[in-house]
Amino acid sequence: MIPSQYLRHLVFLGLGVIFWPSIAAHSAIVLTVKQVGNDVVVIGSGSANTTSLLNPPGSPTPEPDSTNVLWDNQIYAGPDAFGGDGVPPEFDVNRWGGINGPLSFNTDPFIATTYPDSGSGDLFGIYIDTVNNQPLLVLPLLYGSGNPLNGTSRFDSTTLSGLGLNPGVFTWNWGTGQNADSFELRIEPVPVPAPLPLAGVPIAWKMAKRMRRASRDSPAKATS
């Protein structure tokens, strides 16, 4: 007879197999921005349920865009849409409305337009429409609902503060019920190195242990 605890495990495993495809298809998009050495890296992954997304006001189709740029109101992961030659393609992405969330993400409002030095994968992110005062979700052109997204952008020889970015977590949501989904932007704080005295404590402790062990293991001095 199979123990009841194993039967429970099998039931949970079966439910996971059944429902995992739908869960994976509607996982939130997460865009992480962090300092990596001398560079700033943007890493994005996830998927989007587009069922409840809307066309932006005044646009008969999802509004097109063709730039990967860090500006005061937009941030994307993925390759440089201009391909490094300064000549944009017709369109690389669409901008979708119908999402709710912050109308800024702590960027410097006076930051100069900055293009990534390199990038790969899918081009997607967040665009703040300051004219209509609404956030727009940026997805690849002809993106299929639930398809996986993965993209990376790198800004060489700069810092988060140099790009006008402050640490924080910003979330946008859209849809309800099974069509609910979200986009999360995480700007990670720069790790603070430990103070020098604290950093040296583990080393000093190891040296003290070695000296104590050496003293204990050394032959006792002969008495006269």
Image (cartoon, helix red, strand yellow):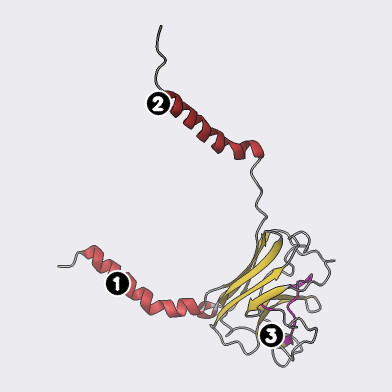
**Which residue type does callout 2 highlight?**
Asp
Q: CA distance from mark 3 to mark 2?
A: 71 Å
The location of residue 77, given as percent across then percent down, is 66, 74
- Residue 93, x across and y down, in percent: 69, 85
**Residue that lies at the very extreme toward the top in this rendered image:** 224
Determine whether the residue tagged by mark 3 lies in a helix, strand or loop: strand
**Badge 1 element:** helix
Callout 1 environment at 10 Å: few (<14), some (14 to 19), or many (20+)? few
- Disc nearest the viewer among 1 and 3: 3
Q: Nearer the viewer, mark 1 or mark 2?
A: 2
Residue 139 lies, in percent from the top left, at: 65, 82
* Residue denoted by label 2: 217
Q: Residue flagged by tag 1: what amino acid is it?
A: Val
Which span is picked out in magenta?
A: 64-79
Residue furthest to the bottom in view is 60
- Which residue corresponds to mark 3? 93
Q: Can residue 9 be seen at all in this image of the molecule? A: yes
Kindly identify which residue carries mark 1. 11
Foreground residue, 14 or 147?
A: 147
